[in-house]
């Protein structure tokens, strides 16, 4: 039997495709881009794909021939992909540059030289800033909630807690420059938005020797849309096809509110400046623990990050301490139909940490299909489940004293690399071509799928043991930890040939993933587990860049680590 969640996800996928195809084929017919015959063919193709998909789900529930069901689902998925590919050839073209003409802008490569020891007499310096992003006019203006596709889309009706940007600026005192790590309560942020913020900080960074600026998302599903997918899709599609055709891509619209995004860019850049200007000397400590079962995996092979990592900065002058937490679990607790704006459980971790007078920042990890496990919430808790879940984690963080934490030597090494990821998923490629999302892309040829995401990965070292991989999406934990499906177990009969990312580094180091960092290109699945979107527990393929995403990014990470002289061979 299909679970209610799988049925819901399948419905959303089909509704989106139906809205898209109806809007584009109707508009093309009205403007003479296609004949009535071609328009009917498009509609017939859509009906065929939808019928095949519906039939696949019917036999999923009613029949018992697994091989037959699997074949039928594959046909449905292939049919939908072919329909979208055909429609994409009719869409007007966005002015994407050819890959040979691409010029990198507002990208930070990081440190050219890595240090193996701290500089004599050096001390850590850390600065912190926080700013609310909640608009004051939410009662008089519609702001779409990013995270769940509903019809009509969810809008902000009330403010439950806060949507914020939090920033830390870190320097090891070596004179090689500071690094910035900002995190925004949102579903995700594109490379375009990240680089917009960087462009606003360009002069400031040059004047103050900031060598790296990194912006990630908490992946909260109950905050204002920052990617564009969660607005009124039929209206968006009708407008965008027309404006792109007329050569006015600047007039495309989406679920993103332009004024909100402008404010987000401005407040984030100002918070970075505030964090840098507030840097103080002190000591850095950390603790990794796995005795809170805080998450569960909804997709085979059921691998998840069990650790929570706490990083703790104590200023020498006795001012407010800063606590960072790194863990991996989807913040998906709230119903968008209710319209409550919230940072989900993350706000309530912060609530507890702030009670102690500390600053707080949260980093989301590899949480492809990882959900929260509220079994840690004590019996008799009075708040809502996600609130008490966050408070429980916050209280546990505070129960770990400085004496129990490990001192981190002042060594900061950071390096990033641009990566070109093939856009092989027709659903996401269609969203790109319709001007709904604004990731940076380039063309590699004239075919529909000759497109690459321009994104980036990063590698950071803090002290002797802490290591971080900055990944531009929602990564499968097995890519980090191992345990990928074998060729016999996989959906396409192949093996995953890369070692676990943690094994690329020397023993004794702790590699932690910061997900949705510096871009958001969807789910990152092992290539051999990239299957049909209509198969059970394969929803993630519908919101992935494509079947080569993981091998492209993990391969690039391996080369990046090697360029830093850290790869274990």
Image (tube, grey):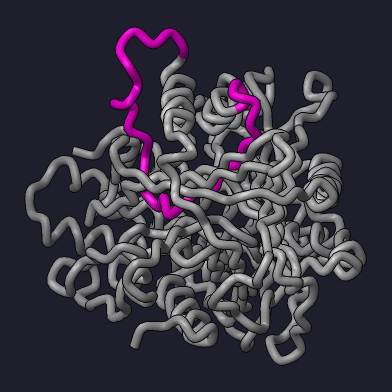
Question: Where residue 276 sits in the image (x, y, percent)?
Answer: 80, 53
Q: Which residues are magenta?
A: 354-383
Instruction: Please give the count of numbered marks on the rendered protein.
Output: 0
Q: Quadrant of the N terminus?
A: top left
* Residue 526 seen in the current view: no
Question: Where residue 379 sits in the image (x, y, percent)?
Answer: 30, 12
Question: Where residue 387 sits in the image (x, y, percent)?
Answer: 48, 21
Question: Where residue 283 sits in the image (x, y, percent)?
Answer: 61, 50
**Name of the residue lying farthest toward the bottom:** 100
Query: Can you say whether 551 is above or below 179 in the image?
Result: below
**Name of the residue lying farthest toward the left:** 64
Query: Can you say whether 234 is above or below 546 in the image?
Result: above
**Which is more toward the observer, 216 or 322?**
322
**Which is more toward the observer, 13 or 280?**
280
Query: Can you say whether 193 is above or below 101 in the image?
Result: above
Image quarter of residue 211: bottom right
Q: Quadrant of the C terminus?
A: bottom left
- Residue 380 among those drawn in magenta: yes
**Which is more toward the observer, 229 or 33?**
229
Residue at (67% x, 83% y) in the render: 112
* Residue 51 seen in the current view: yes
Image quarter of residue 30: bottom right
Query: Can you say whether 401 is above or below 37 in the image?
Result: above
- Residue 371 among those drawn in magenta: yes
């Amino acid at each position: 039997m299909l679970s209610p969640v799988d049925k819901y996800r399948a419905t959303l996928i089909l509704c989106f495709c139906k809205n898209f195809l109806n809007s584009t084929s109707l508009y093309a017919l009205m403007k003479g881009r296609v004949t009535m015959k071609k328009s009917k063919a498009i509609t017939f193709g859509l009906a065929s794909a939808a019928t095949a998909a519906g039939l696949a789900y019917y036999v999923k529930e009613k029949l018992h021939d697994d091989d037959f069901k699997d074949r039928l689902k594959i046909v449905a998925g292939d049919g939908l992909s072919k329909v979208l590919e055909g429609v994409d050839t009719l869409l007007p073209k966005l002015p994407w540059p050819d890959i040979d003409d691409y010029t990198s802008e507002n990208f930070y490569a990081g440190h050219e030289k890595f240090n193996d020891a701290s500089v004599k007499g050096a001390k850590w310096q850390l600065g912190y800033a926080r700013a609310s992003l909640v608009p004051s006019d939410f009662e008089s203006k519609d702001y779409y909630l990013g995270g769940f596709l509903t019809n009509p889309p969810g809008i902000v009706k009330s403010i439950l807690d806060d949507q914020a940007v939090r920033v830390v600026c870190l320097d090891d005192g070596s004179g090689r420059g500071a690094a910035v790590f900002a995190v925004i309560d949102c579903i995700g942020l594109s490379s375009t938005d990240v680089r917009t913020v960087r462009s606003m900080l360009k002069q400031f960074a040059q004047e103050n020797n900031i060598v790296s600026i990194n912006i990630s998302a908490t992946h909260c599903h109950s905050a204002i849309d920052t990617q564009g997918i969660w607005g009124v899709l039929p209206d968006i599609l009708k407008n965008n096809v027309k404006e792109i055709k007329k050569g006015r891509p600047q007039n495309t619209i989406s679920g993103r509110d332009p004024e909100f995004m402008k404010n987000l860019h401005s407040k984030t850049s100002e918070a970075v400046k505030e964090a840098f200007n507030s840097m103080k000397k002190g000591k850095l400590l950390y603790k990794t623990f796995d005795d809170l079962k805080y998450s569960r995996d909804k997709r085979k092979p059921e691998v998840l990050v069990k650790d929570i990592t706490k990083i703790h900065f104590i200023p020498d002058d006795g001012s407010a301490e800063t606590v960072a937490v790194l863990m991996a679990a989807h913040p998906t607790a709230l119903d968008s139909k209710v319209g409550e704006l919230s940072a989900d459980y993350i706000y309530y971790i912060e609530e507890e940490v702030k009670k102690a007078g500390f600053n707080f920042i949260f980093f989301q990890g590899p949480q492809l299909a990882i959900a929260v496990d509220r079994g840690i919430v004590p019996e008799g808790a009075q708040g809502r489940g996600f609130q008490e879940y966050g408070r429980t984690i916050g209280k546990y963080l505070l129960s770990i004293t400085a004496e129990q934490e490990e001192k981190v030597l002042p060594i900061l090494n950071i390096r990033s690399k641009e990566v070109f990821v093939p856009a092989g998923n027709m659903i996401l490629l269609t969203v790109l071509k319709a001007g709904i999302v604004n990731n940076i892309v380039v063309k590699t040829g004239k075919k529909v799928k000759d497109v690459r995401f321009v994104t980036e990965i990063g590698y950071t070292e803090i002290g002797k043991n802490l290591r971080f991989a900055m990944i531009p999406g929602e990564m499968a934990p097995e890519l980090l930890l191992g345990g990928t499906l074998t060729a016999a177990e996989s959906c396409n009969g192949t093996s995953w040939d890369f070692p676990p990312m943690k094994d690329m580094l020397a023993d004794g180091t702790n590699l932690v993933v910061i997900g949705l960092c510096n871009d958001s290109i969807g789910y990152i699945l092992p290539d051999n587990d990239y299957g049909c979107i209509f198969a059970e527990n394969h929803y993630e393929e519908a919101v992935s860049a494509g079947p080569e995403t993981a091998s492209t990014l993990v391969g690039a990470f391996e080369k990046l680590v090697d360029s830093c002289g850290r790869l274990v061979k």
